[in-house]
Amino acid sequence: MLSVLLLLGLPAQAVDKAPDITSLTYEIIRKGSSIGTHTVSFGPEKSGTILVDITAKIRVKLVFITLFRLDHNAHEEWHNGRLVKMDSFTRENSKTKEVEVRVSDGQYIVNTIKGVIKVPDNIAPSSFTMPDFWISSGTKDFTLLDTLSGNLHESRLYYEGRRNHLMNDQAYDTRYYQIIDLKTGELSHEFWVDDAGYLVEANIMTHKGEKLTYRQIEPEDI
């Protein structure tokens, strides 16, 4: 049912440095209903290394019956602005997926159930924790690494300017971004990001025409 909904990953924020905020939580919304949460936690920066831990939980129910469940955990290590390690584990209903990223001889190696592949140096994980990801003008081409499956998507990031974004009856002055899948030419992501680099809200488009919204909330609101 929802197996394609997270195909392009789970948005977080770019980490230009160790953030002042150590944890960010997002509500996941589908068709106007809350179906789960997504939390990004940042460890203290040590010797140029930033640790990022990601947890997501989705449940789609019909009355008292759970139609779909997903649990996702990932750990990333960034050193001097470069991804040096990532481990991702996802349980989708009864199926499990694991993605491992390492660096060997200056090249990224991605290990999944499908095998081991070498990937381009311009990869950005779909957690969107890549430093300096949010450009201040123009466009940027990159290879999006789906942290749930290990699939690659040639993509282009567009900075669309400043937008006054209304969320939960509150107006936010944000920078607005879009990502286009270069293979299909279709919009895959929308982001509203504040000037500190924190994601305020995001939309993810699916291959079946659905939309997931990620909306920043306080942990006590869960």
Image (tube, rainbow, N blue to C red):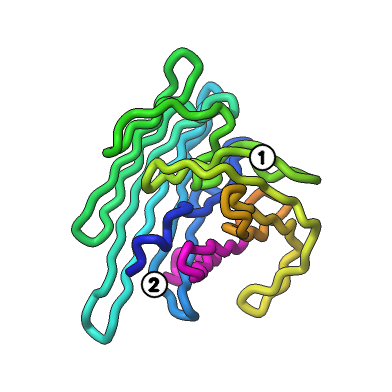
Give the label, 1 or 2, closer to the camera.
1
> What amino acid type should be assigned to the residue bearing mark 2?
Ile
Q: Residues within 10 Å of mark 1 (few under 14, many from 20)?
A: some
Q: Residue 218 lies in magenta, yes or no?
A: yes
Q: Position of residue 126 (x, y in %)?
A: 50, 47
Q: Position of residue 36 (x, y in %)?
A: 39, 67
Q: Residues within 10 Å of mark 2 (few under 14, many from 20)?
A: some
Q: Position of residue 59 (x, y in %)?
A: 31, 70
Q: What's the magenta region?
A: 200-222
Q: Is residue 14 visible?
A: yes
Q: Could you say which disc has been placed on residue 141 in the image?
A: 1
Q: In the rendered view, does 178 fall on the left or right side of 145?
A: right
Which residue has dot 2 on it?
35
Q: In the rendered view, does 175 fall on the left or right side of 219?
A: right
Residue lying farthest bottom? 63
Q: Residue 188 lies in magenta, yes or no?
A: no
